[in-house]
């Protein structure tokens, strides 16, 4: 590429977000539209598609269309009229590139793009916009193809870290630049020396200063001055400054109130639901529109952790220049993938694990085995339509398409065939796949006996709500499913195309050795539907200090948790989810949950964020149900606007307005005094910037105060809303994924 314009650069970087602009994707959309236009009776084709009962029938409908028109075109072009001529078979019927090399010609590494990103980063650095400078320096490194481009990117990013006092990251990048320059660049040597000087590591600094002086070949007063400082202090044992950047990705706690107690023998027996903590939850089929739910098997206290779970699959959201693609940890100096410009890793070990085939899902959320070599943009389908201006896209979004692909890519072929055909480990208790049988039939019985997030049967049991979807939505998702199957095939996932069993319904007595591509497409179509209502956004809190103020909540990944997905929504939930290390989550009780009561969480914001009508509208659009929770029917938001708070007197149990100050019945002011004391405790914890070693104690104190407040303040009114928001901020900041990132030059941690 002889020079890259800003428009071309923007066009390449948008591929990190969605791949709809790629020529091959546009050609695919056009080919499908052309086939439909040429089919003759379009109404009949629409009717035939509507009558498809299962996802397998839907993808076969499209695949047969491809086969029919491909062979018609082939005969016309070659002018062969012999009816007995053998028809073409295989992946070429889709009229798409058969090899991944043909597919990724314009989506790989590129030194010109790397150079443009480097210049963009320098522009932001001169404007003191260090966040964007870091983003573009990392993009530059991701796209760098030659050793020359890599060393420039490492050098610029390392110097940015040095300015910000991110010493460890600066040393890593500058060391990579030094290696690429074979220790023959004086500027790199000076930068390394200056970094060590800031860290008060004078011996290391002296080594690089002498190298720089030798490489320059002339006297440099600054170098000589620093050499004198190092020689004077080389025996000093002074500690360097505190590292300016840190991250926290904790594992789930046992409880938010106290340390977990020792379990009895009965409590530690093996259970089929290992995600459930201390046998707190159980499944229940309501046989109503609420479907399968999770309810309390016993009384659950405030702050008790009732569920921990790792995702079956998760995908890192754009921009992917902040977190490791494999472990999802925040990382300043991501190391680029060797073979593609779209992802980075903490280190070589994370990259190795991400690309290993046959690795257990539980060992790391980010798989990159079938997404490398430049194919990733093709998985980010956002607008699957030849004419996007004519209406909305119904694929879900780029993240759900990517996640549906990842679910199948994460699943070994043998395991997938076993589940579909009810053979192997699923022979006795297999329920059949919802892509080949109606959901009503599969979900009428109990959930899989081994309901764990690492087993495919769990993620294949989620409700796709197919009956609530329109024809156009199912058609667009079918197109997306076939295209994603094609991408998975050319990426090396073994499957057969248009062979004898291609259109055959799965049968336990005829288990294929290689899975038909039609089966894979049907599974992906099922997951495209299920994920639009069952995927979850993982978040990370980015803050300039350890104080809970001014933080930014970032969406870093999209994941699917089979067990958590069974928890229904309420605008006034009794439980809350918190994101933890490696894409994990835990759910804790926000309020006391009585035995046999349903456990609920909020899919959106709480009932205090917007009017009931607005919440219901969004929930209906995104999750396909009508919310009839107590907060919606009781118009809690509307009531809270005109009511500060209602207190409950601990002496006589009388309810009175907080504005009264004392109980209107017994004249006691005890409720008001306790309320003031407890809110002061929570506010103090929110304003205190402390070391992470103190965070568990702060969480316990905050939870104890929150528990007592619920006995005093009724759950309606502006004051209760404010206290609840403050308490949850404390929990998310102290128990969830957090990064302390002071990007202003010279900022130090408190």
Image: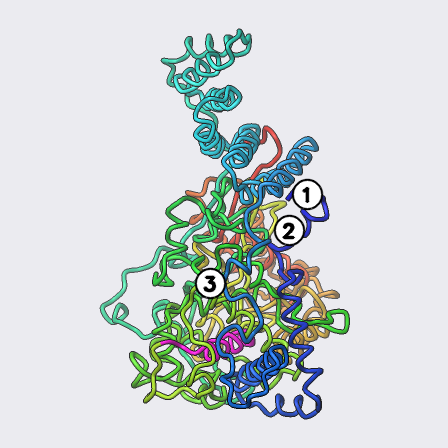
- Label at residue 491: 3
Q: Are marks 1 and 3 in contact (CB under 8 Å)?
A: no
Is residue 537 magenta-colored?
Answer: no
Residue 176's place in the image compared with 293, above or below, is: above
Tell me which residue sits at (43%, 48%) in the image.
697
Which of the two residues, 393 or 617, is positioned nearer the viewer here? 393
Using the rendered image of the protein, determine whether residue 698 is visible from the camera's viewpoint: no
User: Disc 2 and disc 1: Cα gap in Å?
Assistant: 10 Å
Q: Neighbour class for label 1 at 10 Å: few (<14), some, many (≥20)?
A: few
State which region is magenta. Answer: 514-530
Using the rendered image of the protein, determine whether residue 161 is visible from the camera's viewpoint: yes
Q: Identify the residue at the far left of this view.
A: 265
The image shows residue 346 at horizontal and vertical percentages of 44, 45
Magenta highlight: main SS: helix
Which of the two residues, 427 or 596, is positioned nearer the viewer here? 427
Q: Are marks 2 and 1 in contact (CB under 8 Å)?
A: yes
Q: Quadrant of residue 581?
A: bottom left
Q: Identify the residue at the far right of this view.
A: 390
- Label at residue 12: 2
Residue 356's place in the image compared with 448, above or below, is: above
Circle 1 residue: 4
Which of the two residues, 705 or 473, is positioned nearer the viewer here? 473
Tell me which residue sits at (22%, 68%) in the image.
265
The image shows residue 160 at horizontal and vertical percentages of 57, 31
Is residue 524 magenta-colored?
Answer: yes
Q: Neighbour class for label 3 at 10 Å: few (<14), some, many (≥20)?
A: some
């Amino acid at each position: 590429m002889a020079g890259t314009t800003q428009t071309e650069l923007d066009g390449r970087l948008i591929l990190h977000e969605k791949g709809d602009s790629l020529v091959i994707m546009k050609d695919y959309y056009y080919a499908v539209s052309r086939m439909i236009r040429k089919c003759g009776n379009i109404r009949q084709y629409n009717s035939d598609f509507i009558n498809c009962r299962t996802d397998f029938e839907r993808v076969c409908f499209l695949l047969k269309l491809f086969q029919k028109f491909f062979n018609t075109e082939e005969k016309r072009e070659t002018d062969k009229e012999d009816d007995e001529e053998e028809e073409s078979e295989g992946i070429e019927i889709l009229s798409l590139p058969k090899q991944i090399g043909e597919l990724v010609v314009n989506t790989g590494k590129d030194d010109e793009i790397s150079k443009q990103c480097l210049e963009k980063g320098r522009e932001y650095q001169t404007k003191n916009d260090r966040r964007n400078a870091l983003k573009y320096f990392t993009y530059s490194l991701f796209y760098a193809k030659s050793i020359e481009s890599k060393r420039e990117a490492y050098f610029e990013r390392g110097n940015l870290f040095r300015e910000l006092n991110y010493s460890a990251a600066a040393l890593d990048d500058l060391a990579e630049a030094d290696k690429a320059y074979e220790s023959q660049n004086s500027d790199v040597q000076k930068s390394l020396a200056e970094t060590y000087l800031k860290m008060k590591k004078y011996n290391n600094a002296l080594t690089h200063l002498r190298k720089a002086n030798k490489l320059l070949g002339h006297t440099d007063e600054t170098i000589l001055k620093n050499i004198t400082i190092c020689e004077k202090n080389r025996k000093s044992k002074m500690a360097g400054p505190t590292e300016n950047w840190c991250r926290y990705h904790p594992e789930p706690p046992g409880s938010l109130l106290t340390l977990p107690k020792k379990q009895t023998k009965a409590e530690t027996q093996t259970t089929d639901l290992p995600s459930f903590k201390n046998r707190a939850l159980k499944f229940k089929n309501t046989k109503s529109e609420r479907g399968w739910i999770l309810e309390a098997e016993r009384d659950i206290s405030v702050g008790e952790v009732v569920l921990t779970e790792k995702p079956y699959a998760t995908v890192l959201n754009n921009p992917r220049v902040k977190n490791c693609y494999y472990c999802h940890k925040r990382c300043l100096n991501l190391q680029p993938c060797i073979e593609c410009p779209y992802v980075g890793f903490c280190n070589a070990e994370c990259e190795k694990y991400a690309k290993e085939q046959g690795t257990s899902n539980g060992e790391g959320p980010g798989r990159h085995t079938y997404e490398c070599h430049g194919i990733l943009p093709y998985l980010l389908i956002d607008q699957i339509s030849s004419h996007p201006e004519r209406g909305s896209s119904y694929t879900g979004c780029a993240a759900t398409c990517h996640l549906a692909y990842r679910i199948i890519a994460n699943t070994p072929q043998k395991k997938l065939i076993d589940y579909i055909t009810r053979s192997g480990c699923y022979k006795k208790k297999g329920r059949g796949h919802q892509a080949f049988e109606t959901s009503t039939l599969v979900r009428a019985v109990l959930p899989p006996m081994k309901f764990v997030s690492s087993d495919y049967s769990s993620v294949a049991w989620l409700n796709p709500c197919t009956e609530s979807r329109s024809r156009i939505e199912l058609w667009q998702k079918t197109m997306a499913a076939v295209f994603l199957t094609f991408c998975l095939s050319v990426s090396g996932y073994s499957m057969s195309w248009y062979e004898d069993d291609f259109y055959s319904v799965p049968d336990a007595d005829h288990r294929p050795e290689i899975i038909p591509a039609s089966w894979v497409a049907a599974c992906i179509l099922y997951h495209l539907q299920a994920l639009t209502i069952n995927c979850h956004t993982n978040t990370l809190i980015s803050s300039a200090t350890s104080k809970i103020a001014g933080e930014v909540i970032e969406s870093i990944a999209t994941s699917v948790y089979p067990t958590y997905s069974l928890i229904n929504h309420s605008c006034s939930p009794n439980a809350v989810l918190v994101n933890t290390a490696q894409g994990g989550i835990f759910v804790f009780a926000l309020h006391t949950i009585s035995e046999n009561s349903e456990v609920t969480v909020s899919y959106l914001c709480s009932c205090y964020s917007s009017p009931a009508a607005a919440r219901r509208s969004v929930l209906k659009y995104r999750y396909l149900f009508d919310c009839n929770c107590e907060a919606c029917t009781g118009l809690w938001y509307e009531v809270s606007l005109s009511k500060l708070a209602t207190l409950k007197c601990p002496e006589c149990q009388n309810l009175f307005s907080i504005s009264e100050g004392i109980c209107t019945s017994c004249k006691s002011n005890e409720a008001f005094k306790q309320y003031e004391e407890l809110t002061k405790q929570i506010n103090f914890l929110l304003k205190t910037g402390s070391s992470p070693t103190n965070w568990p104690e702060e969480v316990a104190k905050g939870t104890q105060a929150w528990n007592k407040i619920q006995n005093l303040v009724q759950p309606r009114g502006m004051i209760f809303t404010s206290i609840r928001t403050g308490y949850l901020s404390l929990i998310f900041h102290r128990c969830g994924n957090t990064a302390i990132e002071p990007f202003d030059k010279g900022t130090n941690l408190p």
